[in-house]
Image (spheres, rainbow, N blue to C red):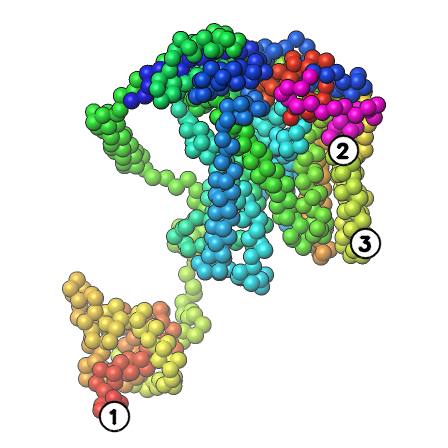
Amino acid sequence: MYRATELPPAPAPARRRTSRGGAPQTFPSSLRVEPLVQGDTSLGKLDDHVRDLSEAKPPRSWYVALVITSLAGLVGLASVGFMIYEGIGTMGNNVPVVWGFLIINFVFWVGIGHAGTLISVILYLFRQKWRNAISRTAEAVTVFAFVCAMMFPAVHVGRPWLPHWLFPYPNERGLWVNFRSPLIWDVFAVVTYFSVSVMFWYLGLIPDFASLRSRVKSRVKRAVFGFMSLGWVGNARQWLHYEKAYLLLAGLTTTLALSVHSIVSMDFASSMVPGWHMTIFPPYFVVGAAFSGFAGVVLVFAFIRTAMRLENYITERHMDLLNKTVLFLSCVMAYAYLMEGFTAWFSSNTFDRYIFANYVFGDQWWAGSLTIFFNCILPQLLWVPRFRRSVPIMVLVSAGVTLGMWLERYTIIVLSLHRDYLPATWGTYLPTPIDFAILLGSVGIFLTLLLLFLRKMPIIATWEVKSDIAHHQAHPSGGLEAEHA
Amino acid sequence: MLEPLFGVLALFPTADDLLKAIPEVKKRGFTKLEAYTPYPVHGIDEALDLPKSKLGVLVFLMASLGAISMFLFEWWTSTVSYPLLTAGKAYNGWPAWVPPMLEGTILVGTFTAALGMLFVFNRLPFFGNPMLRSKAIDRITREKFALVIRPGAGGLDTGGAIAALKAAGGEDIEVVQAPRYSKAGLAWWSKAIGAVGAACVVAGYGTAWVIRTFPTTRPMVEMEDQPRLDAQAADTFFASGRGMQLPPDGTVPRTFMPILAAGPGDGGKALMNPLPVTDSVLERGRTQFDIHCAVCHDRLGTGKAWLDSTYKAQPTDLQSSTVRDASDGYLYWVISRGFASMPAYAADISPDDRWAIIRYVRALQRSQDAPMRDVK
């Protein structure tokens, strides 16, 4: 797909060649793309690099970062504990804004979590081989973001010690859940997404655990990795079923990835609140989730790519492609915002029109305005090819998008709820320090888990990148790697 | 008993070398081949004539089963087991069941794909694989490509296999032995069952000890713990020392009119039953009688109720001629003021209910001594 945008028109159509047999042939230089692996590398060197990352003593900065993030996480957990002990009143949400920070954070983290699935699954179905090197870490981002996301509805239900009431199970009260409620759809969607993401992640890790089990020094680690690899030996028959399972999972999980944020959006869209009751919400939320997720992944890789010496495997071209995706999704978001405004205007509904104007010109005008700035205007910098490869610019844009997508959820939830149909019920919303502490804590938990993952687990799907390296070695002059997909 | 020889193994530096070697080894008559690679090599399934994976069929069946069972579950809970009316919508409004159905389908489908691949098709986890004991396995998972000639029905010509692999360009040739396994015998099973049993006993007694030793605490008291005075709680704010204040003397609740009869001598003779004899009055009387009276007087009024053996006082037989002959007013007076061991019910039963009870008692009396014309 990217070939069309990346390559100038070919002077002559290149003959396709199959992976086996066929005479080796050269391509016109205009047809060559940057290879997906660079520098002096081989199957064994990649293996060593990934092993060293999980074996060697981490640098001092890693420990400092870990202390800071885990302290932030502890502050957040302590605030959650205080909130449960003292009551929901310690947070800012109250009538009319009954969904405050907790639901904003929930939607935000679920959105961040979409990147992993989209990268590992949808790009896999589209045969985008550049996903291979980044898929593992992106999947980790998904899993950890979901750990954070699931915390919020669990503590928002009012009685967090009864979370099992969310599930339909035979009970002595003879009650069942209400399957007509979007909130119960949400429970099913989020729990399914989390368990499938964890399983997909683990499935990809099995061959890498097999590769690590004999190369780590400590006996304990060897036993753990050996057990986690389930006795994988890389038999061709095993790979046959494995790849089939991977393809089936990719197909099924694509449906899941598109459905989860649609269902989250129905929590809003199926209500009658002005600003929520719109049919555009499901696709709009899915694009927003992908957008914030890709920005989050860019942010992670911008920091670890050089710090962990991954330049040979996560090349500038990877970052370029990720940033192009961010730019594309930013344009789709801008279209969604415009359509939202158009719908409000075209409906001739006073309240819908008022709410939309209120996003940008109301008493909290900064929320809506900054959302549009960060999500639609700032990413336009990425049209410049040089900026797509510049670390400061991509950090600026991705951090802006992450913040902008959080503000978008703030706008949707707070600014819609605080202006209802009845002006008598209008109110304001002011978050409390507890709200901010819980948000900070979720960031801390996410980063703590990510830091541990980065230094303790294989952060690159070596079995996927090894096929790229093998291809690169067979065709060092570069070529159309899509041919080998 | 497994074959002691697992096979003869050779390593190849690249996937292309392996793919070229397979037909050469096959030409020499070795057909039972296995390949081990660090990543999935495309084209190897055709070279080794591996059958296509049937995982898709399994996933399709299980995902369909997931969809159907999720739909039936939602239908059963929403319309049969717990029909809940929301927003005036029909109980069997199936469109709203689609999202959970979709998620259920995907959940079952994906878990079937992953676990079916691991457990059913690949028979993992399997830590007894002879390949795991070979010298080559560490290099296979790293960067090398292995071809293994397995013994057929007639065993394996080891020398010939080594020669064939060498001719095909294989390096580091290794004869992989299969370890001998002995079947788990009676001793092993008795140990295993004994260990599980011992673990159960220890866990059970441990739990019982913890529950007995430490007082049970309720981690969450819901909304019981509130800054308010409960009905019987003491409080220093009022001089009486009570949380709840007593009503002023002479206060009566609404509808609870005090009985105006002068005293025991009067016996309420002047009072008349104000209620008519209707089904609803008798029904109300029966309810109140069963709540307040039947426990001593029996549901038929015979006075032989459940309290007989332990409760020393003898409740009055309401079927007796004394009660039959007593006026409604007198019975009302007894219910209100109490009689012998029977306490006063003026505070517990409203006046209308007392009169309804009396109507019902009269009906009970007639039911136990019905004249022939009633039966007809």
Measure how far apart labels 2 and 1 are at the Cα level: 95 Å
Mark 2 falls within which chain?
A
Q: Is residue A152 visible?
A: no
> Residue A313: horizontal and vertical position, in percent?
65, 16
Residue appearing at x 21%, y 85% in the figure: B369
Q: Which residue is mark 2?
A: A328
Q: Is residue A249 magenta?
A: no
Q: Is residue B317 visible?
A: yes
Residue appearing at x 32%, y 86% in the figure: B270
Residue appearing at x 54%, y 32% in the figure: A244
- Badge number at residue A346: 3
Q: Nearer the viewer, mark 1 or mark 3?
A: 3
Measure how far apart labels 2 and 3 are at the Cα level: 27 Å
**Which quadrant holds residue A447?**
top right
- Badge number at residue B373: 1
- Badge number at residue A183: none
B39, B6: nearer the viewer: B6
- At label 2, counting other C-alpha atoms closer than 10 Å, the crowd grade (few under 14, some 14-19, many 20 or more) is some
Residue range of the region highlighted in magenta in the rendering: A1-23
Do circles 2 and 1 both sit on a common chain? no
Measure how far apart labels 1 and 3 are at the Cα level: 82 Å
Judged from the image, the secondary structure of the residue bearing numbered disc 2 is: helix
Q: Main secondary structure of the magenta part?
A: loop
A277, B33: nearer the viewer: B33
Contact? badges 2 and 3 (CB < 8 Å) = no
> Residue A184: horizontal and vertical position, in percent?
54, 48
Rendered position, A174 above or below B164: below
Q: Is residue A20 magenta?
A: yes
Rendered position, B326 above or below B43: below
Residue appearing at x 75%, y 16% in the figure: A26
